[in-house]
Amino acid sequence: MSGIVIGEPPTADGRHTPGPGTVPGPLGKGEHIAVEATGDGAFLGYCHSGRARNRSYGGAALGQALAAAYRTVDEDRAVHSLHAYFLRALSPERPVRYESQAVRDGRSYSMRQVTGVQDGKESLTMSVSFKLPQPASALRQPGMPDVPGPEGLGDAWAFRPTDHPLRTSLDYREVPRPPHPGNPATGEIVRHAWLRTVGALPDDPALHACVLAYISDAPLAPTALVPLGEPRPAGVALASLDHAMWFHRPVRADRWLLYVCRSRVAGDGRTLAHGEFWDRDGALVASVAQEALLHVR
């Protein structure tokens, strides 16, 4: 699929509308997060494969579900949080139908409930909250981690085929970890990764938010696999169960972002991870939390 998801100006009724892609690069054209209107209030999208070729990458479903929600909300509202549950594995071979329901439209906040359906079965649910932007004000935040910048770091996608959509879409560089990256006192494992899209993106905050959702799924839960020989340890099954994001500031996904991923706990066949996105000016732009199924055989 091609075409910017929500990169064109809104229509006369104030809704976002798709348009032809004009920017080089896979995500520059919005291909992996593109959804097309079906004419009955729903949208269709294809989610490319992830770690397994027969299973879709969860970040593509997140980006597409958020895009579907954006397509049904007034253009003066921006996402500030989303909460998604992955109910069934998706196939990259068949389309996903996204149905976006208006839960509430208030003076300052709007809520959408999105359901992703494949083969007639609900596979994803997402609650998305939008708000009117407020005047700029001072924010309280922690300091950005002091780590090396992306310049000079190697390609962290080396384990993926050169034609894999993630590798052709995202520039991903990881800060080298110590031989034993876990903290014995806390049990926490931390990964620092720099990411940006390969292609430049239009100046559309909604598009950048959808792309950030797409990016956020890639290295987060796999942080739990670091002690097991990540990225591809033998005898390990890992699959996202849920995913939540909070957007603190407007973000540009085509500029370097530091993604700090922390795996805090693993047990009972599950693992929980938290993440923060920082821009190069030291601003905390988004926070993420994800629980995943983790089976070690």
Image (cartoon, rainbow, N blue to C red):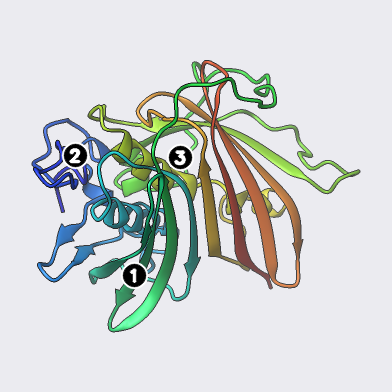
What residue sits right under mark 2 in the picture? 29
Point out the tag, 3 or 1, that comes first from the N-terminus: 1
Residue 116 circle label: 1
Residue type at mark 3 is: Ala
What residue sits right under mark 3 in the picture? 158
Q: Residue furthest bottom?
A: 120
| Pointer 3 local density, CA inside 10 Å: few below 14, some 14–19, many at least 20 | few
Q: Nearer the viewer, residue 229 or 215?
A: 215
Q: Nearer the viewer, residue 143 or 75?
A: 75
Q: Nearer the viewer, residue 91 or 285?
A: 285
Q: Is residue 191 visible?
A: yes
Instruction: Give the image location of residue 28, x and y in percent.
Output: 23, 35
- Secondary-structure class at tag 2: helix
Quarter occupied by the N terminus: bottom left
Quarter occupied by the C terminus: bottom right
Q: CA distance from mark 3 to mark 1?
A: 31 Å
Q: Nearer the viewer, residue 79 or 52?
A: 79
